């Protein structure tokens, strides 16, 4: 059981589930919950999950020395998974995800291959470039939503807002993670935003991005999203505001990361259930006595 737990932690199963949920949301939003192929949706989610898992594993492979300082309990530095096993696992996950994408369409194959390539490039050297590394992670994360539209082969414009949301929120989370890992990153010459401009100024950038998210949040209501979107986005606001009010310190980075992780899941659920046709907010207002 300890070995299984170690591999579950290595692939960051909870994050993989979040990525697949983003793909499902993208598929259903782009197709307007109609003409859904369960086979295509399942394969699409598997592709996203496998490629994401491969990215998390290869990231731990290249981060082993940093993790000895920042996160010594991670499976590889803790000695629970060998470096060789992790490399093989990552290659297999990437390959399987890319091969499965062939079943969907050519665009899915191209995107899955490029995503795997970007995740490898991020882990091997882009991570140390700071903002560019953050950009790649934000892009690949938001692509999991857009991949759903590619699988559905329709409604690309409908997933534009959720994709933008995901990109901005992930950028916030990446900068916050850089704040949390400031000490280890400084020793290993990782040029995160926090290392480059300082922890407090990095928090200033984070708060500006959070304001952008809060301004954009009501927009889908005008596009006809239903009452569940309003309810869930209110919860989203709670966690975004809690992040905004977090102390501008390394310790605050750990809290902010957890808050934003919850906010990301809530945002996906808001777009997923909020896009379901029928019970629009305007309908509720009209029916209210």
Image (tube, grey):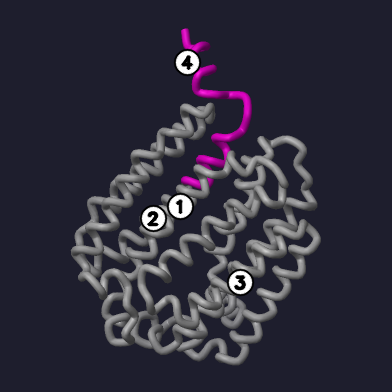
- Mark 4 Cα within 10 Å, few/some/many (few <14, many 20+)? few
Gap between marks 4 and 1, in whole Å? 28 Å
**Frontmost residue, 206 versus 235:** 206
125 lies left or right of 118 = left
219 lies left or right of 8 = left
Which residue shows up at 60% across the image and 46% down it? 25
Looking at marks 3 and 4 on the same chain, the residue that comes earlier in the sequence is marked by 3
Residue span colored magenta: 267-289
- Mark 1 Cα within 10 Å, few/some/many (few <14, many 20+)? many
**Dot 2: element:** helix
76 lies left or right of 53 = left
Gap between marks 3 and 2, in whole Å? 24 Å
On the image, numbered disc 4 is attached to which residue? 285
Confirm or deny contact between disc 2 and disc 1 (CB under 8 A). yes
Looking at marks 1 and 3 on the same chain, the residue that comes earlier in the sequence is marked by 3
Image x and y of residue 131, in percent: 36, 68
- Report the disc number at residue 116: 3
């Amino acid at each position: 059981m300890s070995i299984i737990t170690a591999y579950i932690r290595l692939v960051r199963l909870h994050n993989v589930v979040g990525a697949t949920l983003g793909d499902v949301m993208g598929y259903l939003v782009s197709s307007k919950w109609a003409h859904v192929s369960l086979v295509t949706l399942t394969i699409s989610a598997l592709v996203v999950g496998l490629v994401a898992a491969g990215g998390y594993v290869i990231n731990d492979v290249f981060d082993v020395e940093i993790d000895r300082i920042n996160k010594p309990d991670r499976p590889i530095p803790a000695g629970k998974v060998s470096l060789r096993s992790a490399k093989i696992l990552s290659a297999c996950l990437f390959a399987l995800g890319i091969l499965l994408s062939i079943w969907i369409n050519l665009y899915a194959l191209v995107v899955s291959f490029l995503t795997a390539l970007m995740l490898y490039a991020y882990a091997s050297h882009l991570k140390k470039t700071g903002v560019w590394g953050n950009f790649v992670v934000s892009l690949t994360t938001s692509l999991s939503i857009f991949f759903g539209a590619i699988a559905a082969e329709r409604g690309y414009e409908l997933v534009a807002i959720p994709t933008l949301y995901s990109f901005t929120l992930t950028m916030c989370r990446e900068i916050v993670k850089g704040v949390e890992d400031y000490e280890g990153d400084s020793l290993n010459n990782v040029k995160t935003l926090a290392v480059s401009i300082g922890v407090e100024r990095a928090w200033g950038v984070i708060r500006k991005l959070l304001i952008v998210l809060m301004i954009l949040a009501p927009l889908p209501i005008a596009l006809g999203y239903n009452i569940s979107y309003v309810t869930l986005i209110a919860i989203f606001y709670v966690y975004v505001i809690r992040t905004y009010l977090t102390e501008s310190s390394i310790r605050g980075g750990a809290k902010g990361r957890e808050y934003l992780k919850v906010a990301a899941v809530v945002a996906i659920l808001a777009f997923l259930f909020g896009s379901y046709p029928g019970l629009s907010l305007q309908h509720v207002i009209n029916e209210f006595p």
